[in-house]
Amino acid sequence: MELVFATNNKHKLEEVQKLLGNNFNLLSLKDISFEGEIPEDYETLRENALQKARYIHDRFKTNCFADDTGLEIDFLKGAPGVYSARYAGPGCTFDDNINKVLNEMGYAENRKARFRTVIALILDKKEYFFEGVIDGKILKEKQGNEGFGYDPVFRPLGYEQSFAEMILEEKNKISHRGRATQKLIEFLLKK
């Protein structure tokens, strides 16, 4: 089965392709000759994921899926949430976002957080949703060099390593995106 993953994020593409294995032919936006940005103007992960999937589906008339992911920190009342990728402002880097979170949290005792991913799939013109969540905590400083985004400061519950200290296969087994993608795969294999 051929599916387009509506993202420009090469790290996400790599993670999801690893999870899908050889069961599916995953196409990137580059593979379908799409350049540019896909809008994300909504206030929820579900709405943003669906907006991105519809944007590509409407233009290319192809089966596709998109995701939106947010880091939700208790001490910051759920922030950065839907704004996780651009928390430090337009054109910010992963490090800018991490530094803003660490500065806002300071020495707070409550460091509980969760990563949440929502995948919106459009398959044969029908819409489906899959969600994955992983609980953990925000570290006081970066640890590890793997992964991307907030991975260096997020330690999943029950583990001694941050996501950035884990190899991709280990992270994919437990991550929010891995869990949502596994639900997507199980659904697709039944089709």
Image (cartoon, rainbow, N blue to C red):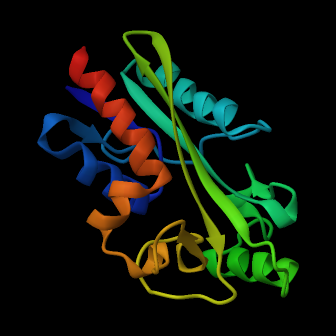
| Residue in the foreground of this view, choosing between 118 and 48 | 118
Judged from this view, the residue extending furthest toward the front is 158
**Residue drawn where x is 36% and y is 21% of the image:** 62
Q: Where is residue 72 in the image (x, y as percent from the top left)?
A: 72, 56
Q: In which quarter of the image is residue 125?
A: top left
> Does the rendering let one see residue 166?
yes
**Residue drawn where x is 49% and y is 68% of the image:** 158
The quarter of the picture where the N terminus appears is top left
Q: Where is residue 149 in the image (x, y as percent from the top left)?
A: 56, 69
Left or right position of 138 against 109 = left
Judged from this view, the residue extending furthest toward the left is 22
The quarter of the picture where the C terminus appears is top left
Q: Position of residue 177 (x, y in %)?
A: 46, 49
**Residue drawn where x is 50% and y is 15% of the image:** 127
Left or right position of 118 against 112 = left
Q: Where is residue 71 in the image (x, y as percent from the top left)?
A: 67, 58
